[in-house]
Image (cartoon, rainbow, N blue to C red):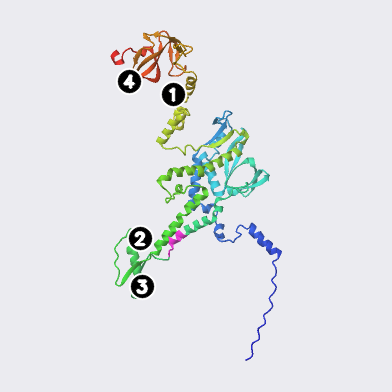
Amino acid sequence: MAAKKPTAKAPRKPRRPPSDESVARYALRSLTDVYPWGRYGAHLLAEQDASTVVKVTAILACNRFLAQSIACMPIRVMRRLANGRKVDAVDVQGRDTICRRPNGFQTTYEWVEQHIWHVGLYGNAYSRRVFDVERGYVGRLLPLHPTRVDPWWASEDTLGYTLTKGNGTKEELAQNEVMHTRWLSDGGRKGLVPFELCGPALALARKLDEAALGYWDNGGRPDLVIETDEAIPKEAREAMRQDWSNDHGGASKRGGIAVLPKKTRLRPIEQNTAEAMQFIELRDSIVPDMARVYGIPSTLLGDHRMAKYSNSEQEFLTAHVFGLMPWQRRLESSIDRSLLWSYGPDVYAKVDSRGLLRGDTAARTSLYQALWGMGAITPNEIRDLEDLEPLDEPAADETFVQLGFSTLAAAAAQAAEPVGSLSTSADGAAADDQGDGESVDQAGGFAVGQYVYWSDGEGTIEHLMTSGVLGVEGSPFSISASPDAPAASIRVHRNGEPTEFTVGKPVSELSATPMEAAA
């Protein structure tokens, strides 16, 4: 048998090197395309905008929490004085526009709430500054929808804005005509849109919502199967199914007694329950995912899995420091840049969050006692913090320290110049440190060194005065002495032993015998 000749193979065509155009096209796509590694899930992302993503309850909860929390905090216009003190700048023109009435149809709460809502959903919020020509300051702040405003670079450090009106016409606005608040920005011109940065997670959340509706409305797999070993005609099967549904279908008929035909049995499909639990678990994971995007503790959005009594207070503090404070500073700096820049660096806006941080009655009482006891706050300031009317007493505007509850000025004078005590001279005689008072050995029927009594104590007279002031002049506890009304400095005794305390008393209140015996 003759050997077969090997079949000749066609010569391989030389491989054509890639053209410069294809290489350039590939490089261009990989560097500039939004999806350089493919467009997996791009059809889901293309359907997303603010009106659809807000239907995801986690996004709605995050933006509602931010908008309402910031809107609850009053806005104050402050001035920093040369001595470092901060006071309300009540003389700043346009202050009422910022703090009380931004425009004719919104309250300050509504305007701030809408402003923060726009930043949270669109990454940008705009308000048009309308000047009061007669008064020369901003008279109104009109909110502009972010989808109708497009910022552009007018110069290296100045922006311009193109406003598309309702009738389709466009108007160009200067930077000083618009108050612009941004979210995170990688170019400085415009804030990034939060839901675009977490698009896949939001697309998953939306698909889970759609799947939930289909799961309960259009589920093709039953939870229960009636089995039999015999053939059943179609009409009998339909009648059995209808009778079972009528007798046991619906929540009101749950738990009833079933009677099965001969040679039939029930078999539940347990896989449905497992899938339902997995589905609920997957949906619950969306809440902490969105909470991470906005920096909000998930427990404040209804995440019951992480809610614990032991960490609730810390969660509230974390929400304020890492969740709300950046938004406070974002709004404050936007007002400073757009509305208060002409008043100089000492005038600034402050979003006051003290009301949000107020504790319960016991916690506030403890704080006020500590501040008042160290002389850091006056009684009227405490009443102002509690929204109470100020007292008319001058002492209510004084600060006190626990040196007999004297004022700070009186305590400082008493520390610098101790009054009512005696120093000993070289010859052992008592020297008077009073300076402007007259010290005597006897007055009002009493003498120095005599043991005396008064209504709530007893002791030894160390010093007698017939003129001047015993104590710090101006203090509510000072005693004026005169020849007709002398005063005494007394060493207090307890249980018959002298103590380190001295008191000042008018001589008219003293007795040589115990007060009960004198009575």
Residue, x 40% and y 18% (percent of image)? 502
What is the distance, in whole Å, between disc 2 and disc 1 at their CAs? 76 Å
Q: How crowded is mark 1: few (under 14 residues within 10 Å), some or many (20 or more)?
A: few
Circles 4 and 1 in contact, beta carbons < 8 Å: no
Residue, x 42% and y 33% (percent of image)? 366
Residue 350 within the magenta-colored segment of the rendering: no
> Where does label 3 land, which residue?
235
Viewer-closest of 379 and 18: 18
The mark closer to the camera, 3 or 4, is: 4
Q: In this view, does 118 lie to the left or right of 487?
A: right
Circles 3 and 1 in contact, beta carbons < 8 Å: no
> Where does label 4 land, which residue?
495
Q: Is mark 4 on a helix, strand or loop?
A: loop
Where residue 250 sits in the image (x, y, percent)? 35, 60
Q: What stretch is highlighted in magenta?
A: 211-219
Residue 214 within the magenta-colored segment of the rendering: yes
Q: Which of marks 2 and 1 is nearer the N terminus?
A: 2
Q: What element carries label 3?
A: helix
Q: In this view, does 465 lie to the left or right of 39?
A: left
Q: Which kind of residue does numbered mark 1 sit on? A: Leu
Where residue 313 sits in the image (x, y, percent)? 43, 42
Circles 2 and 4 in contact, beta carbons < 8 Å: no
> Where does label 2 land, which residue?
250
